[in-house]
Amino acid sequence: MMGVLHSINAGIVVIDRDYKITLWNDFMVSRSGKRADAAMGKVIFDLFDEIPVNWFRRKVESVFTLGNRAFTTWEQRPYLMKFKNFRPITGVAEFMYQNVTFIPLLGVDGNVNHAGIIIYDVTEMAVGKQALEGANNELERLSRTDRLTDLYNRGYWEECLAQEFARYKRTGQKATLVMFDIDHFKRINDTYGHQAGDEVIRQVSRTLRRTIRKVDIAGRYGGEEFAVILVDTSEENALILAERLRKRIEELSVSHDKQKIQFTISLGLSMLEESVTGYTNWLERADQSLYHSKENGRNQSTVFSPQLIKELKSAG
């Protein structure tokens, strides 16, 4: 039996009620670097200060008291004892990931006076799962991201717009939508080329990210048009941010092929309020405000109002 315990490909440790080690198999010797004679009779906490004492005591006391097994997985706690990872296939891991089982050991008197601890090396499985999750997360990110600007693409951004409107209907939390586009963008493409136009769009997106908060939701709506949901933001504060962005873009100079390109943007704003019938109506209002800015000289911000609709109708 001792030969089996020492040859098994898992760590086997037995402790008594005082947490002193009474069995230490060869797996533990090779992984911990501590010989059996150096471990036997020692309190396990004295050998491994990375073991969380209170958590470990709760696990082991339930084994002693109830006579039931206890478990922990690498996803709950990466390791019990921090051993180096020596597996060449999974060498990217800094340490050995472990699943651990605590088992009650009955004495000849029928009482549980010792607890067995079985430590399984699950590094390969853990690293594989983490790699798969990382790949899936990256695919999900790519599916919702515009490649040129690294902002949300239109499809995902519109999902966020619908969610924000639903939250407003549920909580009444205000939010303001800002739409803007680059003035005379076609002229930039025709004069400097489409690569220059792409660089202008990239610089606008960088300036936008630098201007808004982390909680705000920015996307490339299409071509040279952008949209931002300003969460928990009043119309007045949204206008301050819009003007800050407009001035930063106006001062921006994009270098391309030894040429300096300067340009402006026009913006339209619409705050959520009771008269907004849905997220598409919210979007329409911001778009109408943007149209008003462009029709009235460009390089300006317009806030939606009922009067604006009258002006657009009379102009049309």
Image (cartoon, rainbow, N blue to C red):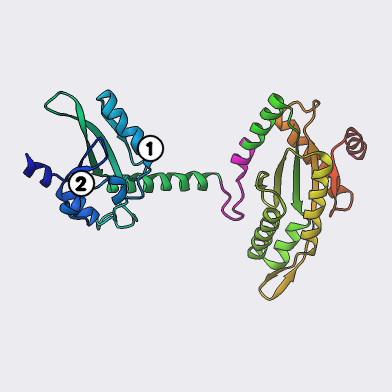
Residue occupying the point 84% across, 55% down: 299
Q: Position of residue 46 (x, y in %)?
A: 31, 49
Q: Secondary structure at mark 1?
A: helix
Q: Tell which tag, 2 or 1, sits nearer the viewer.
A: 2
Q: Amino acid at mark 1?
A: Trp
Report the quarter where the N terminus lies: top left
Q: Secondary structure at mark 2?
A: loop
For the stretch drawn in magenta, what is the main secondary structure? loop
Q: Position of residue 35 (x, y in %)?
A: 18, 55
Q: Does residue 222 appear left or right of residue 175 in this picture?
A: left
**Mark 1 = which residue?**
55
Disc nearer the start of the sequence (2/1): 2
Please tell me whether residue 153 belongs to the stretch shown in magenta.
yes
- The span from disc 2 to disc 1 (Cα, nearest Å) is 22 Å
* The image quarter in which residue 118 lies: top left
Residue 233 visible in the current orientation = yes
Residue occupying the point 80% across, 25% down: 274
**Nearer to me, 189 or 181:** 181
The span picked out in magenta is 145-159
Please tell me whether residue 112 belongs to the stretch shown in magenta.
no
**Mark 2 = which residue?**
41
